[in-house]
Amino acid sequence: MPLWSIPANEYHRVRWRNGQGWTREIATGRMPGSPTPVDDWDWRLSIAEIEHDGPFSAFPGSDRVLVLLSGGGMRLLFADQRAVELHPPHARIAFAGEDAVQCALLEGPTTDFNAIVRRQRCALQVFHRPLVGSMVFFAEPGVLWAIHLMAGRADVKSADAVVELQAGDTAFVDNLEGAASLRSILDGGGDALLVRIERRFE
């Protein structure tokens, strides 16, 4: 099925890999024909709950994008002494999963959208889009789109199917094994994150 959705109340709350916090796991998946990886996924989407200063979990061999969803922001300090501050609304950063990162909260707890992919299997892009009416997007062969609705309400239409999204829900348009592009429409009002995961063919 090329189009489906997961409501926010069905996300699974799990511990961080390093045990320092909690995350609500939206979904994970594997690329077609992928050998079983250590964590049994090639891509993962989640919402981290950061309540205190501390280190991020390491994901060697992965690429990550983090987007601030709520809260007063954070300062990230990397092992090479690079420092980056993320401020509301919805600042984001891309970095390598093996980077050693210390997080210092600026004004209390935050929630943060996390997209992680194994770079040998997938390429990752994350876009923030304010929604005012309709927008058309295409899932080319070998591409998976995830649409996370941060605020408002929206419909996603693709391949003669429609799913409705409320704030916090996530929809998926899956063309990882398709032979032709899928035309999809995102229609509504609010704010959305669009995550594009592209299969790397060997």
Image (tube, grey):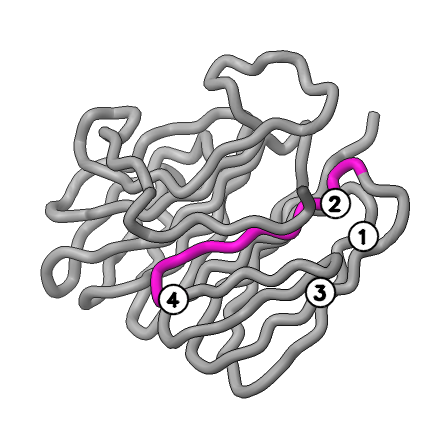
Q: Residue at x 16, y 62 (%)?
A: 106
Does residue 112 appear left or right of residue 110 in this picture?
right
Gap in angstroms between the C-alphas marked 3 and 1: 11 Å
Q: Position of residue 94 (x, y in %)?
A: 49, 51
Look at the numbered disc 1 and give the secondary structure of its residue: loop
Q: Which residue is most to the right? A: 179
Cα distance in 3D space between marks 3 and 2: 11 Å
Amino acid under disc 2 = Asn
Mark closest to the chain's N terminus, 3 or 2: 2
Circle 4 residues within 10 Å: few <14, some 14–19, many ≥20: some
Q: Is residue 174 above or below residue 61?
A: below
Position of 100 with respect to 2 (left or right) is left
Q: Which label lies toward us, 4 or 1?
A: 4
Identity of the residue drawn at 71% across and 65% down:
184
**Along the polypeptide, which appears first: circle 2 or circle 4?**
4
Look at mark 3 in the image and give the residue it sits on: 184
Is 180 placed above or below 59 here? below
Which numbered disc, 3 or 4, marks the residue that appears first in the sequence? 4
